Amino acid sequence: MRCPYCGHEESKVIDSRPTDEGERIRRRRECLKCAKRFTTYEVIETVPIVVIKKDKSRETFDRNKLLNGLLRACEKRPVSIDTLERIVDEIENMLQNSLDREVPSSLIGKYAMEKLKDIDEVAYVRFASVYRQFKDINTFMEELNRMIKNRS
């Protein structure tokens, strides 16, 4: 690690500890030439996930877009923001752990619907109505009947 004071390329690590979030490691270093101390942070480098949309266009995965969709579905429902953030974290982890760097948006929607179904059925139906693009009341009723049948 290059010293920010003298530019020397060798230093020793004096102290290492994880940050509050546990996402990074904070390292205190001392330059072997000028003996000044400085701090560095080490982070895991992640490969971005590319989402293939319905129109075949591609964009990088944006967790905020997913969170906003879940928030709209859960509006005026007894679902906490912490629960929704946990869902987004779980989905993001599933995507990161898969070997695919490009995933269809339909897969992300499917994961979100599976998670919502266990938490709030009304939010699930709201999300499904947008995700599956319900054309009319019959499509809506088919989904509700399927839910009732699975519950039995």
Image: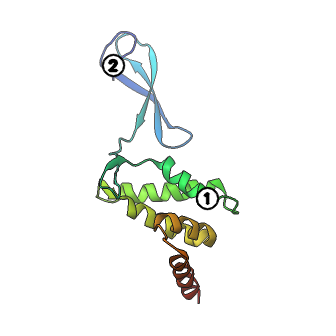
Is residue 124 shown left or right of residue 36?
right
**Which residue is more in the foreground, 20 or 11?**
20
Q: In the image, residue 117 lies at what x, y percent?
A: 56, 72
Q: How far apart, in angstroms, are the residues tagged by discs 2 and 1?
A: 42 Å
Q: In the image, residue 56 lies at what x, y percent?
A: 29, 55
The residue singled out by tag 1 in the image is 83
Is residue 7 shown left or right of residue 28?
left
For mark 2, give the secondary structure: loop
Label pair 2/1, CB-CB below 8 angstroms: no
Question: Which of the numbered marks, if any, corresponds to residue 68?
Answer: none
Q: For the image shown, how many numbered marks are present on the structure?
A: 2
The residue singled out by tag 2 in the image is 2
Between disc 2 and disc 1, whose residue precedes?
A: 2
Screen quadrant of the C terminus:
bottom right
Q: In the image, residue 82 lies at what x, y percent?
A: 63, 54
* Three-letter amino acid code at the position of disc 2: Arg
Question: Residue placed at 54% from the left, 52% from the top?
Answer: 67
Question: Residue placed at 59% from the left, 61% from the top?
Answer: 73
Q: In the image, residue 140 lies at what x, y percent?
A: 54, 76
